[in-house]
Image (cartoon, rainbow, N blue to C red):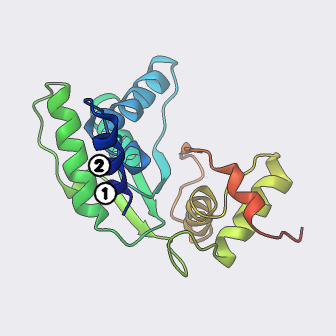
Amino acid sequence: DIYEEMDRIAGEMGRKVYKIPCGGSNALGTLGYVDCVKEIRDQGMTFDHIICAEGSGGTMAGLALGAKLYMPHARVTGMMVDTDPFDQITVRLMREAAALLEADMQIDRNDFDLRDMCGPGYAIASEEGNTAVSMMAENEGIFLDPVYTGKAFAGLVRRAREGFYKPEDNVLFVHTGGAGGLFAQDWEI
């Protein structure tokens, strides 16, 4: 258990430590993506849909809260790459981050969308995700990883093919990194 190990190491250090949870998914970490949406708005950009991977909750919660504050017409969708209860985790993180901002607002499950893109399991590449990784690399020269951004982009592609997005929609895919994961598997392109 990673958190037990953190506690053990903190105890050995003999001083006060600040433990950052996996993915930085706490109220403070969530604020980074709240600011991300504010920066996008301040640069004069606007989007109808914002898409991201949902792997520990902080990115999604920050984008959803940021959209609620700074781009209320945008719909944020988390493409879940794990089976955790993200409907609850995201709401909790949004509320905790809003409290840090002293933003008095109603936050609930209706503030965002979630789509299951976990595939065969967390940290296990999926065929659909790998196809999306290859598509992005071949067409844009941008590298996604097979565990998070590849599965999330596969969800965006699936929804586009299903006709979910209108031709006039501005859709933002938030690439959160992880390209190092590409080196953990064999690729045939």
Q: Amino acid at mark 2?
A: Asp
User: Which amino acid type corresponds to the residue marked 1 in the rendered image?
Assistant: Glu
Give the camera-side residue of 166 and 55: 55
90 lies left or right of 104: right
Q: Quadrant of the N terminus?
A: bottom left
Task: Say whether residue 181 is visible.
Answer: yes
The residue carrying mark 1 is 4
Q: Residues within 10 Å of mark 2 (few under 14, many from 20)?
A: few
Q: Quadrant of the C terminus?
A: bottom right
Q: Which mark is residue 7?
A: 2
Check disc 1: other Cα within 10 Å, few if <14, some if 14-19, many if 20+.
few
Task: Give coordinates of residue 39: x percent, y percent.
Answer: 46, 22
Q: Is residue 132 left or right of residue 10?
A: right
Examine the rendered structure and indicate whether residue 25 appears above or below residue 105.
Answer: below
How much space separates mark 2 and mark 1, taking CA atoms?
A: 5 Å
Q: Examine the rendered structure and indicate whether residue 43 appears above or below residue 32.
A: above
Residue for point 24% across, 43% down: 94
- Residue furthest bottom as drawn: 120
Tag 2 and tag 1, C-beta contact below 8 Å: yes
Q: Is residue 128 above or below residue 9?
A: below
Element marked by disc 2: helix
Q: Residue at x 55, y 82 (%)?
A: 120
**Residue 167 x/y as whole percent:** 60, 52
Q: Measuring 22% from the left and 52% from the top, which residue is drawn there?
A: 91
